[in-house]
Image (cartoon, rainbow, N blue to C red):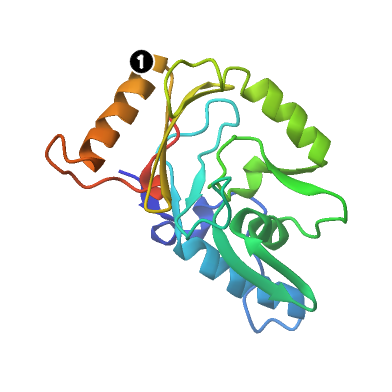
Amino acid sequence: MSTTATDRTPEASPEGHQRQPEGNPAVSPLDAYNEKARERLMKRVTIADTPHPALGTPCWTHGGAPSNTDGHRYLWYGHEGVTEQHAHRASYRIHRGEIPDGLIVRHQCDNPTCVNPDHLELGTHQDNMTDMALRHPGRAKSGFKGVYQVKYGWQAAVTCANKTLTKFFKRIEDAAAWVGEQRQRLHGLIPAAPLASSAQLALF
């Protein structure tokens, strides 16, 4: 079973992500704000049971509302004139630092709901477009609606009421079967069952 980030001890967080206790005179206003922002961020995070097959650490899936049509999640971040509305960008600022002008925050895990700073990196828009071409060479060729080829397998996606459910599979047949089952449930063709939110779906 996946666990929420708040269920884990501080020692379980990735090394280097801990900050000094609030009230320490050495803590800057930015560090104090980031500590509070991190608490808000992690309240909506579900940590996957298994690590990403290439990165070695699990995805931190954020359960906030969608912030755009790309699958990113919403989290307000605002300090000294810097504002963010995407949870992954806020996570990068909280854990890594500034985002220089002209750069974007990219997901190495190819999971737009992930806010694990170990899975985030800076890059250009062109870097992102190049990665998309490499990671999704078969988006129009899978043969199944809602099934997309990604770097390490197949991504299945179903959208209902402005909420997108996603799950990753190693086999295209399993991804297609999952999409078909979810669609039948949505249309009442098979008995309804609770649909897991994308925040609860672990990578692989």
Left or right? Give the position of 185 relative to 167.
left
Q: Which residue is mark 1?
A: 173
Left or right? Give the position of 72 relative to 203.
right
* Residue 156 position in % (x across, y down): 42, 30
Left or right? Give the position of 10 relative to 164.
right
Q: Residue at x 53, y 69 (%)?
A: 39
Q: Residue at x 54, y 52 (%)?
A: 13
Q: Give the position of the C terminus as an image quadrant.
A: top left
Q: Residue furthest right?
A: 101
80 vs 191: above or below: below
Q: Residue at x 55, y 39 (%)?
A: 111
Q: Is residue 27 visible to the viewer in this orientation of the structure?
A: no
- The residue closer to the viewer here, 32 or 105, is 105
Q: Give the position of the N terminus as an image quadrant.
A: top left
- The residue closer to the viewer here, 1 or 108, is 108
- The residue closer to the viewer here, 120 or 8, is 120
Q: Quadrant of residue 119?
A: top right
* Residue 10 position in % (x across, y down): 51, 59
Looking at the rendered structure, the number of numbered marks drawn on it comes to 1
Q: Quadrant of residue 32?
A: bottom right
* Residue 142 position in % (x across, y down): 49, 16
Q: Is residue 101 visible to the viewer in this orientation of the structure?
A: yes
Secondary structure at badge 1 equals: helix
* Residue 190 position in % (x across, y down): 14, 35
Q: Residue at x 43, y 62 (%)?
A: 6
- The residue closer to the viewer here, 139 or 54, is 139
Amino acid type at circle 1 is Glu
Q: Residues within 10 Å of mark 1 (few under 14, many from 20)?
A: few
